Image (cartoon, grey):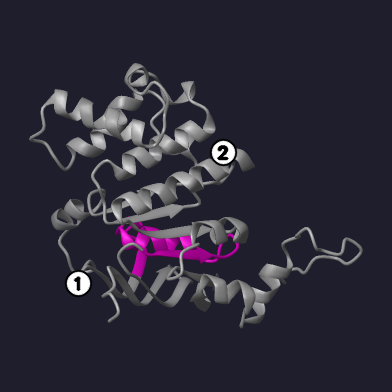
């Protein structure tokens, strides 16, 4: 018997003025499952992720349905939505240097995510949970670094801080929006391994957004994981990871795969283009 979806998006459309950013998008994610959302810049990936948390500006017009664990998020009052945002559904934002407050100590920033949903906790309990979260994402000397500022951390460490902020409330769904952008290959591999470990430990469902097919293949590596390919605001193909990479059906998916060089690529033949 199939597991009921934790997140179910049906016919989601997003418009900004006259511009239609997303067209009738539908997807679902079961508990413990990862869905990779892949496409080039401007395809509507980030707008989709922000819509799930109702973080788009008031000028955005949305239609369709977003259900989380059977709850219609579209029709929730904002006060109820705030209880889900950051607690049941958490997000790792792009660009850790801009996502973190540069003049606020990192311990306070990670703790703020916890205090927003658990105001009853004492300062001692918050501090202990912050240290645990920083240790869980393998930040060295977590207790000693609580009072450091973001600029005192490397790019990979700042990304780990964002992950610590996202998981400290033990969410059921994690939205990872380009979590490895601007990281070198070694640090990228470490972040992906960390996300996989957290997924197994906490049975996290994850929406993993990226323009990088190789990264998506690594993030969505379990038998039930799927990949959805977006082009111009539409999902043009959605399949199990192995099926999509071995037998892509849509011409755009085939061009995406052909545009990425591999060790077997003939260097005398130009790579495919997306236009």
Residue toward you, 202 or 17: 202
Q: Within 10 angstroms of label 1, few (less than 14), some, or many (20 or more) residues?
A: few
Image coordinates of residue 205 in percent, x first then y, are: 34, 60
Q: Callout 2: 10 Å neighbours few (<14), some, many (20+)?
A: some
Residue 197 coordinates in the image, percent (x, y)? 40, 48
Q: Is residue 259 depicted above or below 247 in this figure?
A: above
Visible in this render: residue 231?
A: no
Residue at image mark 2: 187
Secondary structure beneath label 1: loop
Residue 126 in the image, given as x and y percentages of width and height: 19, 29
Q: Say which element carries label 2.
A: helix
Quarter holding residue 40: bottom right
Q: Look at the image and tell me whether residue 193 can be seen.
A: yes
- Residue where numbered disc 1 is placed: 70
Range covered by the magenta-colored residues: 33-61
Choose top left, top right, bottom left or bottom right for residue 56: bottom left
């Amino acid at each position: 018997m199939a597991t009921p979806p934790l997140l179910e998006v049906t016919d989601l459309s997003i418009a900004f003025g006259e511009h239609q950013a997303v067209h009738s998008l539908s997807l679902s994610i079961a508990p413990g499952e990862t869905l990779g959302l892949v496409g080039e810049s401007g395809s509507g990936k980030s707008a989709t992720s922000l819509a799930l948390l109702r973080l788009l500006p008031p000028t955005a017009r949305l239609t369709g349905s977003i259900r989380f664990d059977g709850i219609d998020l579209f029709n929730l009052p904002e006060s109820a939505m705030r209880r889900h945002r950051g607690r049941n559904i958490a997000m790792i934002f792009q660009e850790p240097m801009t996502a973190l407050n540069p003049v606020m100590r990192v311990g306070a920033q990670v703790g703020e995510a916890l205090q927003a949903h658990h105001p009853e906790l004492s300062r001692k309990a918050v501090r202990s949970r912050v240290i645990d979260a920083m240790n869980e994402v393998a930040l060295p000397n977590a207790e000693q670094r609580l009072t450091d500022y973001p600029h005192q951390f490397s790019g990979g460490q700042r990304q780990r801080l964002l992950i610590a902020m996202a998981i400290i409330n033990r969410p059921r769904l994690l939205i990872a929006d380009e979590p490895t952008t601007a990281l070198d290959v070694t640090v990228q591999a470490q972040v992906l391994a960390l996300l996989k470990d957290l997924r197994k430990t906490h049975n996290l469902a994850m929406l993993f957004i990226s323009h990088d097919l190789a990264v998506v293949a690594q993030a969505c590596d379990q038998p039930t994981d799927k990949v959805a390919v977006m082009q111009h605001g539409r999902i043009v193909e959605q399949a199990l990871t192995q099926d999509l990479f071995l037998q892509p059906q849509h011409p755009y998916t085939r061009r995406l795969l052909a545009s990425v060089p591999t060790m077997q690529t003939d260097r005398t033949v130009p790579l495919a283009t997306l236009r």
